[in-house]
Amino acid sequence: MRGDNTRVMVATNAFGMGIDKPDIRLVLHAQMPASIEAYVQECGRAGRDGEPADCVLLFREGDRALQQFFTGGQLPSREELSAVWRALASHTPQGGWLPAALAGVARLPQRRLDQVLAALRSVRALRSSEAGGLRPATRREPQAVVDAAATALQQRQQKDRDGLAAMVLYAKAGHCRWAGVLAYFGERLDDGAARCGHCDSCERFTALLASEREAAPGSSMQPRQPTQPRAFEPGQRVRVRRFGWGEVQDCTADAVSIRFPRHGLRDIHPDFVLATARG
């Protein structure tokens, strides 16, 4: 979509791919996307002309459950994987199997069949013919193909769950938004800074510093005392499903700074941190 006269656009999550308008000044997400990747693609449509723009995410806990419904659900069973593969490998019609015909033979609804075919493609067990039909692309034993496809399905589901957990952390965390996005992709702010200075979290932090200076003019700033006991202590060994075991460096009500052997320093929302013995 192009045009400079459009004032308001309402879009599905295809917004990230279907909008070609450089002067978008505001992207408002009425619902949380399923992953950081999706959110960056969608909000990245704002300000493509180089001028300032705002991105707003309206978050509520119910968004998590809705995305879990879409990304979760029951995976195709090994029996369903096996039924489809047996049909594919038993005989191949001229031009290959068309999905509609394959669904009838395997006795699966189309949506379920699509999941099975995606898993078989991911392990390179299928190829498309010139006519657009499907043919087996491997001579592996049927059980080996089914096992590989089942593993691929489980890995994809786990990746979706991890992506959703990272998106919820982004929405709920109180540290710099942009620093959190960059950390997710294994990057850092320029010059190793802790804050971008532009997001709502950074603005709140700046306002807090200003109010503390006004409350105690001329005196050195003292860190605020925590209003409740810390959930985790520096040096404590903890586990995060996405990154494994790590050691706590610092903790606030919004984020736990954890250093992981393979992933470096990460800020994780306390909801996603599993405690072990202190010390």
Image (cartoon, helix red, strand yellow):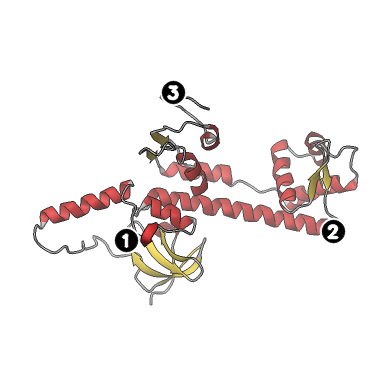
Q: Earlier in the sequence, mark 2 or mark 3?
A: 3
Answer with left or right where residue 159 lies relative to residue 238. Answer: right
The span from disc 2 to disc 1 (Cα, nearest Å) is 53 Å
Q: Determine the CA span between mark 3 and mark 1.
A: 43 Å
Nearer the N terminus, badge 2 or badge 1?
2
Q: Position of residue 211 (x, y in %)?
A: 16, 52
Q: Secondary structure at mark 3?
A: loop
Which residue in the rendered view is the most extreme toward the top? 5
Q: Residue at x 42, y 59 (%)?
A: 188
Residue 171, placed above or below residue 55: below
Q: Name which residue lies at 79% across and 56% down.
A: 145
Of badges 2 and 3, the one in the foreground is 3
Judge whether 101 appears above or below 235 on screen.
above
- Residue wearing tag 1: 252
Check residue 141 in the rendering and tell me which mark sits there, or answer none. Answer: 2
Which is nearer the N-term, disc 3 or disc 1?
Answer: 3
Residue type highlighted by circle 3? Thr
Q: Residue furthest front?
A: 50
- On the picture, is 193 further left or further right than 5? left
Q: CA distance from mark 2 to mark 3?
A: 57 Å
Q: What residue appears at the point 45 percent right and 40 percent down from the top-left corner?
A: 43
Element at label 1: loop
Q: Is residue 110 above or below residue 1?
A: below
Occupied quadrant, residue 212: bottom left
> Front-most of 22 and 239?
22
Do callouts 2 and 3 mark residues in contact (Cβ within 8 Å)? no
Say which residue label 3 marks. 6
Return the residue nearer the eye: 102 or 203.
203
Looking at the rendered structure, the kind of residue marked 1 is Thr
